[in-house]
Amino acid sequence: MKLGAIDQGTTSTRALMLSDGKAEVCATFTHNQFYPATGWVEHDPRELLKNVLACCDALVSADALGLDNQGESCLAWDRKTGEPISPVIVWQDNRTANVTNKLKMDGHEERVKALSGLPLDPYFSATKLAWILANIGEAKDLLSEKRLALGTTDAFFMQNLVGRFVTDVTTASRTSLMNLETMEWDNELCNLFGVPTDTLPEILSTQDEFGELKVKGRMIPLRASVVDQQASLYGHGCRNVGDAKITLGTGAFALAINGDSPEMNDPHGLLPTVAWRLGREAPIYALDGGVYNAASAVNWARRLGLFSEYQQINTFETPAAIDRGLIFVPALSGLACPHWQRESRACFEGMSLDTGPLDLVQAVLEGVALRIAEVIFAMDKSVSIGEEITVDGGLSNNSYICQFLAEVLGRSIRVTNQSELTAIGCAQLAGIGLEEVSITENESRVYTPNGKMRLDWMKTFSSAVTRLSHSS
């Protein structure tokens, strides 16, 4: 049995084949990022589709395929032709912050959270889709002709791959338009945000029969569609309540299995979300906490010339920056969970004349780890998190941030040698109900704390976040 996964992420699209206990990346394609205005982040949908199709070609021998996606990134297209009429507005984009702020001021946030589980934030798709409808003339024309398709990137790919206008329940749960309990588009939410329900795709299960796509003359069933972070949760092997994972990618995303009912109106700023739904089985829910800037903060420091090679920042000869009074709050795109303050901006505190470039990078790594720790501590108040947390993603290759995270959490951090757990989880979901394909090579390295959790670090960092919030 060969299971293929198309991992369509924020910076690249990858094809992975899972076969005989081994996972192999068959192809990788990067794509352009566009920043047409301050706070705006876009992708070219045609470029993404081209890369997805190239990944399909690389997986021509697969028995079944799965597709994972960026989650909240969305666009508009012509339902009749499949041609896009807008750019992809990326999850990092905050052009609709004024809209979500007004909805908050008008008192709508609690109702939105009660129905969708999500706070009002431009991170989610609803206001992005409404922006497209309000600002792109062709969208209005297609709406009048009943040809307008509004949706997340997976639905755009699906229409062009298998000819169906569909999404899956995990992705729909990231839009602010789906009722988290009924698993259907919610008329009240759609009316509030100004997104017509008849422009949205049909919602299917995570593992479902999405259709067949023709790859070099072969018909291959597409059997899974899922948000990348939920795919990663599955790939990590998280199945029981309290199992948690952290992905250190462009952003940092922590998810923990919550059980068979959503944790609505979590008082700690966490998001209830659908982990997955397998066929007609009951859905499994998770608690989700995101940090907007992780590897993106480190890459920003590199672009500034603070360091040149990643090997330089695996260890430091100096004590922890925070112990020396040097703190970085990585709010380069605002503060996500548990604060949800998009207007906040990053800052350094405690710089002096003897502060050097590597001191600043050390503070950046610590700031990312401390933001993640805020999320994990919030999760632990709602569902008991185990004493070991598994971690993946490109930034998990940095030993300093992993050890620092172990110290601040007082928990073991297990970094798997499988760098492609998102794609692996997607492939495994595609294989549900078929012959089981597991991973046989899955060694890992473990970072253990030297003592109890560093609540002193958290207290110092939280004070810096508070000062930043009050100055925004």
Image (tube, helix red, strand yellow):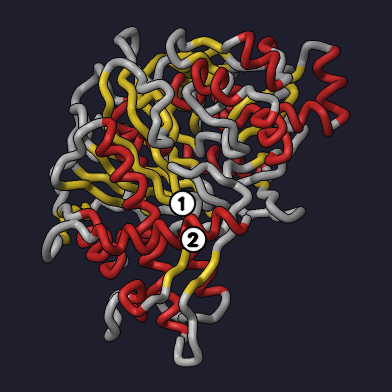
Q: Residue at x 42, y 82 (%)?
A: 358
Q: Residue furthest bottom?
A: 354
Q: Is residue 58 visible?
A: no
* Among numbered discs 2 and 1, the one appearing first in the sequence: 1
Q: Secondary structure at mark 1?
A: loop
For the C terminus, the image quarter is bottom right
Q: Residue 30: image x %, image y %?
A: 54, 54
Residue tagged 2: 330
Residue 104 lies left or right of residue 81; in this view the side is left
Q: Secondary structure at mark 2?
A: loop
Q: Residue 400: image x %, image y %?
A: 28, 70
Q: Quadrant of residue 96?
A: top right
Q: Is residue 6 above or below residue 331?
A: above
Residue 321 lies left or right of residue 202; in this view the side is left
> Alpha-carbon neighbours of circle 1 within 10 Å: few (<14), some, or many (≥20)?
many
Mark number displayed over residue 262: none
Q: Residue at x 40, y 56 (%)?
A: 462
Q: Is residue 189 visible?
A: yes
Q: Is residue 37 above or below residue 181?
A: below
Q: Residue 299: image x %, image y %?
A: 50, 67
> Alpha-carbon neighbours of circle 2 within 10 Å: few (<14), some, or many (≥20)?
many
2 vs 1, front mark: 2
In the image, what residue type sits under mark 2?
Pro
Residue tagged 1: 251
Q: Quadrant of residue 99?
A: top right
Q: Residue at x 52, y 21 (%)?
A: 167
Q: CA distance from mark 2 to mark 1?
A: 10 Å
Q: Residue at x 53, y 52 (%)?
A: 11
Q: Residue 185: image x %, image y %?
A: 57, 12
Is residue 425 or residue 454 the one in the foreground? 454
Residue 138 lies left or right of residue 257; in this view the side is right
